[in-house]
Image (cartoon, grey):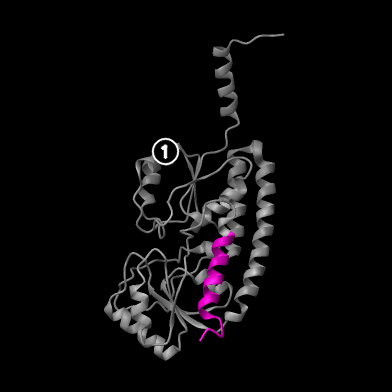
């Protein structure tokens, strides 16, 4: 029997492991991370850059984040309208990485910001596109396809795994879309107001009647004139619910509905309380449908 000396064997093992290592993938936000994780399942796990509850609009990189970007083979982000903090870092830290900007993918549907945005002056800022594109499952299908192609290019040895995972995820997304169509059908025509212009991909996909948003960016709180304009629209439009977001104080939403008969609900476009992984994306969209139903459903008066 051939004998190996341990000091000689260890470098051989490390070399073998390195040759078969999964691509080092960094993804900025949880819903997109979930889609990437589904494609990588059985090969490796992508790193989620933003921790739970962090806002991509105003995040500041930690030293460990900078190191992850420097070592990455692939970085998946939405784009500068959502993650402005990342633009400079991609140029300075991620020179060796491939980058996938979702707003630049040719097969995604991009919507403009909400023309019904409730504001006085320019409190919310200005964006060319609504960057919350993952809230339409059809866009999620296009993201999965693009991620699969990029991973196969980076890691040809696992092309078959990525392809099989992507096909399975596409089937799940088609089923999720049908599920959401059925869940939201009873809510069509019921008017509501959202805190932050983040939901058009969801509301337009399922024909829901949002009358607008209080602010374009959640980090810029609406002022007194915007609150007054929203209260006026609630009275005139017979709005059933005003939806806040869990990362922000409920006082503004409560002030808006006081004395109007409308209710306060909660919507979370990014899944702040969900554990990362392949199941997070579907749960995020189901949570949106459930939250809308809980506040808007008939018979709750």
> Which residue ends up furthest to the left in the rendered image?
224
Vertical relation: 79 (above or below) 245: above
Vertical relation: 109 (above or below) 191: above
Q: Alpha-carbon neighbours of circle 1 within 10 Å: few (<14), some, or many (≥20)?
A: some
Q: Position of residue 285 (x, y in %)?
A: 56, 65
Compare residues 271 and 119 and report the one nearer the observer. 271
Vertical relation: 288 (above or below) 83: below
Q: Is residue 107 visible?
A: no
Membership of 290 in magenta stretch: yes
Compare residues 298 and 188 and report the one nearer the observer. 298
> Which residue ends up furthest to the right in the rendered image?
1
Q: Secondary structure at mark 1?
A: helix
Which residue is found at the position 45% from the left and 66% from the top?
130
Task: Find residue 41 and report its image quarter.
Answer: top right
Compare residues 34 and 113 and report the one nearer the observer. 34
Part of the protein shown in magenta: 282-301
Q: Is residue 278 visible?
A: yes
Membership of 36 in magenta stretch: no
> Which residue ends up furthest to the front in the rendered image?
300
The main secondary structure of the magenta stretch is helix
Q: Position of residue 122 (x, y in %)?
A: 30, 73
Q: Quadrant of the N terminus?
A: top right
**Horizontal arrangement in the rendering, residue 263 relative to residue 187 (left or right):** left
Which residue is found at the position 35% from the left and 41% from the top?
63
Which residue position holds label 1? Answer: 70
């Amino acid at each position: 029997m051939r004998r190996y000396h341990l000091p000689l064997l260890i470098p051989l093992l490390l070399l073998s492991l390195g040759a078969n290592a999964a691509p080092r993938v960094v993804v900025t936000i949880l819903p997109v991370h979930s889609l990437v994780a589904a494609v990588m399942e059985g090969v490796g796990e992508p790193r989620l850059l933003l921790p739970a509850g962090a806002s991509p609009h105003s995040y500041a990189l930690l030293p460990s984040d900078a190191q992850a970007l420097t070592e990455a083979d692939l970085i998946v982000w939405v784009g500068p309208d959502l993650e402005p903090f990342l633009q400079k870092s991609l140029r300075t830290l991620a020179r060796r990485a491939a980058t996938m900007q979702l707003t630049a993918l040719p097969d995604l549907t991009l919507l403009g910001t909400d023309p019904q945005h409730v504001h006085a002056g320019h409190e919310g800022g200005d964006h060319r596109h609504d960057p919350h594109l993952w809230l339409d499952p059809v866009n999620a299908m296009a993201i999965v396809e693009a991620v699969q192609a990029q991973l196969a290019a980076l890691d040809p040895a696992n092309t078959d795994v990525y392809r099989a995972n992507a096909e399975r995820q596409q089937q799940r997304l088609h089923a999720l879309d049908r599920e959401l169509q059925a869940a939201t059908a009873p809510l069509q025509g019921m008017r509501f107001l959202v805190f932050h212009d983040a939901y058009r991909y969801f509301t337009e996909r399922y024909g829901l009647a949002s009358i607008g948003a209080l602010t374009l960016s959640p980090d810029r709180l609406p002022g007194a004139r915007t609150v007054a304009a929203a209260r006026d629209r609630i009275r005139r439009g017979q709005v059933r619910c005003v939806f806040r977001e869990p990362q922000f104080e409920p006082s503004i939403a409560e002030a808006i509905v006081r004395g109007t008969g409308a209710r306060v609900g909660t919507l979370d476009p990014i899944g702040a309380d969900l554990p990362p992984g392949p199941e997070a994306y579907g749960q995020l969209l189901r949570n949106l449908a459930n939250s809308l139903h809980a506040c808007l459903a008939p018979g709750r008066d």
